Amino acid sequence: MPLIAALLLSGTSFAIDPSYKPVSDQLAPARAGKVQCHEPDPAARTCRILTWLSEGANGRVQLRQLTALADSPSLAAELRFTLTREGTAFCGVVDDSYMAGFRIVSGRAPYAPADNKRYAIRYREAMIEALWNRKTCAYAFARPGDPMQLEVGTVDGEFAGELMASYIWIDPGAGWRLKARPPV
């Protein structure tokens, strides 16, 4: 039995605050027309990542994700790919079909394609180095009454703390925008 299955069956919480509980239906907000806003700044109404999810056939989940790469010039990585539901998790493999849904776009709506090969090459190299042909899964956790949710990730069945992220569900027309992380 993979480690992640054993952890879930044993009731482990990935060492997160015990007030967080697994989200049983991760797609309920998406069905209501909401979008995930990762690393939100509510005061500035910005997100580092915007994710649209929709249900497909046979347990498939269609995903479109925009990740802010830079603010000046305004660039984002756009990914479109299909995940598979495995229990309460969404899982996929970073491979050629995953990368086929990747492109660099303007970081401002309507997110037109941008001709910036440097970012495309750097993104692909990072994916190859860290995750190529490895199965990743995302699990959602929430606290009662708190709009902030946690996404916990695994790679090849092993907990991957570096894949943890916080997000909220937002209305797509509410004026939120992408904002890159400050340079390190």
Image (cartoon, rainbow, N blue to C red):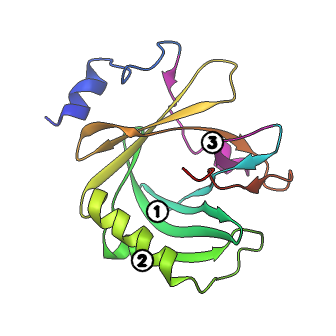
Q: Residue at x 58, y 45 (%)?
A: 27
Q: Which residue is mark 2?
A: 121
* Residue 152 horizontal/vertical position (percent): 43, 36
Mark toward the start of the polypeptide (3 vs 2): 3
Q: Nearer the viewer, residue 52 or 122?
A: 122
Q: Secondary structure at mark 2?
A: helix
Quarter of the image where one finds residue 14: top left
Amino acid residing under circle 2: Ile
Q: Which residue is mark 3?
A: 39
- Disc 2 versus disc 1: distance between alpha carbons? 32 Å
Q: Nearer the viewer, residue 126 or 2?
A: 126
Amino acid residing under circle 1: Ala
Q: In the displayed structure, would residue 140 be above or below residue 44?
A: above
- Disc 1 versus disc 3: distance between alpha carbons? 30 Å
Q: Residue at x 62, y 67 (%)?
A: 76
Q: Nearer the viewer, residue 182 or 63?
A: 182
Residue 72 included in the magenta stretch of the image: no
Direction from residue 124 to residue 52 in the image, left or right: right
How packed is label 1: few (under 14 Cα within 10 Å), some, or many (20 or more)?
few
Residues at circles 2 and 1 in contact by the CB criterion of under 8 Å: no
Determine if residue 58 is in view. Answer: no
For the N terminus, give its image quadrant: top left
Mark toward the start of the polypeptide (1 vs 3): 3
Q: Secondary structure at mark 1?
A: loop
Residue stretch rendered in magenta on the structure: 20-42
Looking at the rendered structure, which numbered label has been put on residue 57? 1
Front tag of 2 and 1: 2
Amino acid residing under circle 3: Glu
Give the number of marks.
3
* Residue 71 horizontal/vertical position (percent): 70, 63
How packed is label 2: few (under 14 Cα within 10 Å), some, or many (20 or more)?
few
